[in-house]
Amino acid sequence: MSDYIDCHYARTRADPSQRPFLDGTIAAGTVVIGGGLAGLTVALELARAGHPVVLLEGRRIGWGASGRNGGFCGPGYALGYDGMARIAGPETARELITLSREGVEYVAGNLASFGMKVDPARRGHISARRVPARAELARYRDKMAAIGIELRVQSVEETRALLKSRLYYESVREPTLFAMQPLDYALAMAREIERLGGKVFENTPALSTGRFGASHLVATPRGKVSAHHLVVCTGGYTGRLVPALRRAMLPIATYAMASEPNDALLDEAIATPLCISDDRRAGDYYRRTSDGRLIWGGRITARTRDPNDLAALLRRDMMEVYPQLGALKIECAWSGLMAYARHYMPQVGRLQEGLWYCTAFGGHGLNTTAAAGRLIAAAIAEGDDRYHLFAPFGLAWNGGPFGPAAAQLTYWRMQLQDWWAERGVAQKMTGTASN
Ligand SMILES: Cc1cc2nc3c(=O)[nH]c(=O)nc-3n(C[C@H](O)[C@H](O)[C@H](O)COP(=O)(O)OP(=O)(O)OC[C@H]3O[C@@H](n4cnc5c(N)ncnc54)[C@H](O)[C@@H]3O)c2cc1C
């Protein structure tokens, strides 16, 4: 039997209950494979529509990326607006942005209905620059305003009053993003699916899939499910169950850690309850929790094996930004896998009659699993065709054996670009100081 990895959310989860594994043969309208936020959203929306649904999770509900992420739920996708517009055209890109914002409010609404209401005083996100960028940020703010995203540029002084680091310059503030305990949310969704009559199985990996007439059949170690629809939501843990999906994604690892509770020390560094990140491609992101901890995340790599001392690695990143946090004790550090498509956008669609996929949300999955999961459920329950919005992105080949190396090289190139830009600023500052 699988259990959760040791991470802050598993340690603090409110619901310790365990679900049964599937033992026997059952029939359903839809079988969903994968109990992360994508699969749970599809299953919850189907259950809400009165559609008979079964969800199979190979390990525990929220065991994958969904139960061990940074907890930031904000609008957008891993690919920015310009990239989306280039591939799908500006109109589709705008519709997708609207969908991603609806995803944020959908999660906030679910949390409220589960008794986990988001505190309005903790809503908002600060994206800080590690190089001066006032004019560039003002242009960016105006451009985002045109597509309905409201941002405010904060000066260096304003930024450093909140984030007491000499590394930061200007920042932009977005008002709708919020943080949550993602594993508690996943578990609450599973309870709600069950309350509405759906069935949720843990420790039940789907081993193979096949067809019997119009039905899809899924075999598990001790059982079978037959259903008219099969939805694959296996994220960064996608195996060879449906080869076309495995060929189209790369598992990418990323890391996070949680500190001891220590508000007094954190006050010396971070004077805001909002979520914070820097704007580098794989930059730092962090937030103070309501129980006095710091959750800090960062780094991405195509190497899926954990480095030896993950906590020390992330602590070094934290200390570079906030040397005043030297005495902060780290309670645990962990990693997780995200699924990335080459185009960075989610893969959402239909492979053949009744066979759906809803995966590859990258590092921006908390709102997008909600947005896409709702579309797939609406397609199954009502014949809604809005999932076609994701069609321009498709199941592009992941590069096969060269995919991970190419992804790693891209990350290193971006790191080098960031380092070069910051080094330029540091040299200018030294020059100014010695003049
Ligand atoms: C450390 C970390 C930090 C992150 N921070 C953020 C953040 O702050 N904000 C944000 O928006 N996104 C963040 N992300 C990304 C986000 O967590 C993911 O995009 C999202 O959770 C993906 O959800 P999912 O349901 O597609 O996949 P997962 O949550 O990974 O779920 C897939 C599930 O499928 C199951 N599975 C796989 N194969 C089978 C099978 N054959 N049979 C049955 N079950 C199977 C797995 O066990 C797993 O539970 C982060 C990710 C990580 C790892």
Image (spheres, helix red, strand yellow):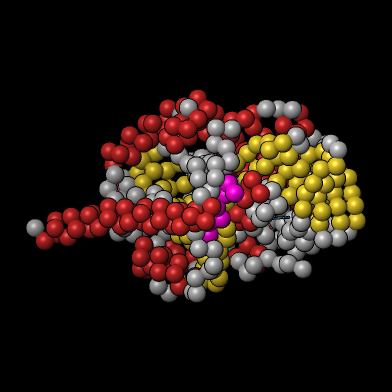
Task: Answer left or right for 335 relative to 1.
Answer: left
Residue 423, horizontal then vertical, whole percent: 25, 58
Relative to 79, does residue 181 appear above or below in the rendering? below
Q: Which residues are magenta?
A: 247-256
Relative to 355, does residue 7 appear above or below in the rendering? below
Q: Looking at the rendering, which quadrant does residue 80 occupy?
A: top left
Identify which residue is drawn at 52% across, 56% down.
401
Identify which residue is drawn at 58% across, 41% down.
395
Question: Who is closer to the viewer here, 117 or 392?
Answer: 392
Residue furthest left as drawn: 435
- Quadrant location of the C terminus in the rendered image: bottom left
- Quadrant location of the N terminus in the rendered image: bottom right
Q: Looking at the rendering, which quadrant does residue 13 occupy?
A: bottom right
Task: Answer left or right for 339 relative to 402.
Answer: right
Main SS type for the magenta part?
A: strand
Q: How many badges with numbers are in the image? A: 0
